Image (cartoon, grey):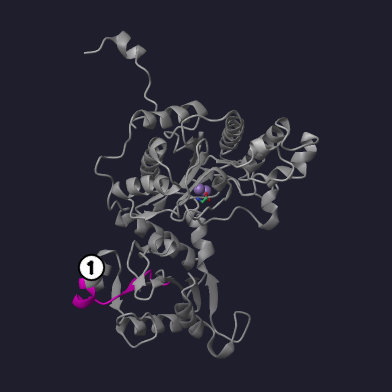
Amino acid sequence: MRSALALLLAAPALVAQSPVPPGGWHHVRLPASFFAGNRARLLQAIKAMGPGTIAVLKSMPVQPANGDGDRAYRQDSDFYYFTGVEEENSVALLDGDTGKYTLLVQPRDPRMETWTGPRLGVEGAKALGADEAFTFNEGETGKGDSPADKELQKTLRAAKRIVFMDNLDMPFRDRVLDVAYPKGTTNWGGGDKILVDGRAMSAEMRSIKQPAEIEMIKKAVEVSIEGHLAAMKGSPRFTNEGQVAGAFEGTVRSLGARFLAYETIAGAGNDGCTLHYPFNDQPIAPGSLILMDAGAELGFYTSDITRTWPANGTFSPEQRKLYDLVLKAQDAGIAEMKPGNPHIASMYAAGRIISDGLVDLGILKGDKDEVFKKMEWKRFLPHGVSHWIGLDVHDAGSYGQGDAIYRRGGSRKLEPGMLLTMEPGIYIPKGAEGVDPKWQGIGIRIEDDILVTKDGPVNLSARLPRKAEDVERLVREGLKKR
Ligand code: GLY
Ligand code: MN
Ligand code: MN
């Protein structure tokens, strides 16, 4: 046993122990009660609109990839939130008068299931909570004469008010509109139905995360952290951006992420200045920074993390000055993420620090108040610095009203249970006019996932080192293993 003194003297671990089990979290899902609870809230809302109100939801259309192939199928976030159904060609109907929940799904089909696996069918749909379930003919959702088609047409025709969660599935939208507005009538007149945008209703429900959702996002974040650690520690061995992205993606997939929350951004040097750099295929020049913005999706919930580190484990003096500035801005932004504060407060807090810092470094010139007020700093930080995360990486939920979101009074107030990123950066591309060449070719972003609680902000991705010295130490750990 180690003595108490030895324990006291032991160097603290750089990265706290991972809570991710060695086998990962494959196929984690929220319980059926979660989806039932969401439907109950939706039912209450549509009931309150008056008699004859129904809600109609449609699964995400299949996205073709090329001639004979489709992209990996990922369910529409709203459809998932209210049903838990992961299959394509599905429709959900909720009747505000009776509370009846109906699922219209694909038929069981041994031949098709040989290719893509088992389907829910009527039995599976009922097991997921549907009071009634009907099947479409193969590949059809609403235009044929299958039991599901008939049920859909009957329900739409009988309704007075249709709350439609339109997800740009155009053929399905046409089917709803054909019933809602027969013979060229519109919402303003002629027809006997009112069409309501259900997306706005679901966005409000989704903007406050429930405890089970927060736990799932924590898992997605932890898996992403493992991916970032693999990429950072591996980078002394890497010679190409593709290896950085590959280390992240291989790790998160092996730990249970079926999907990425978004396409990985792994840019070295000047490529870090391209905000959504899509290529990840260039050589890593000696002495360059690597910017990786990468997130796993776990159980349909996303994470969104960016780290920037020196490929060789040591920041140059210029890189370090800019890095410390971004980190200071991020800390200031996170500190604003308290209940009651407007969402935009974090942008102004971080922006002020970046703006003043760029003047101190001589990159921007003039009076600090003027430079900040005239938003000159936006030249080097052209993106927003915070967005909701959840089922979508840029999650549903309003930020306030129109242009008013840029004014404190018009920006949405933060509430416990909101989850959002804080992601300031500085980007000075090669050839930036009027900027000393020593600063050029540097792109830095630091992004973490913040939970608003009644006691203030909690950084869910804090386990992944951010301070310059910690980042250097971590990368150098990889150097030792060469
Ligand atoms: N990864 C996209 C974003 O940071 O918003
Ligand atoms: Mn983001
Ligand atoms: Mn990001």
Give SS at disc 1.
Answer: loop
Question: Would you say the beta carbon of the disc 1 residue lies within 8 angstroms of ligand 1?
Answer: no
- Mark 1 packing: few (<14 Cα in 10 Å), some, or many (20+)? few
Residue nearest the observer in this picture, 244 or 215: 244
Q: Position of residue 171 (x, y in %)?
A: 46, 80
**Residue 299 image offset from top left, x and y in percent:** 34, 53
Badge 1 amino acid:
Gly
Looking at the image, how many numbered discs can be counted on the residues? Answer: 1
Placement of 347 over or under 110, stated as above or below: above
Tell me, yes or no, if residue 408 can be seen here: no
Badge 1 is on which residue? 117
- Residue 112 lies within the magenta run: yes
Say whether residue 345 is left or right of residue 222. right
Seen as rendered, the residue at the extreme bottom is 183
- Could you say where residue 31 lies in the image, as x and y percent from the top left? 30, 54
In this rendering, the answer to whether 119 lies above or below 186 is: above
Measured as percent of width and height from the top left, residue 104 is found at 33, 75
Work out whether 253 lies above or below 92.
above
Q: Residue at x 27, y 69 (%)?
A: 125
Q: Which residues are magenta?
A: 97-114
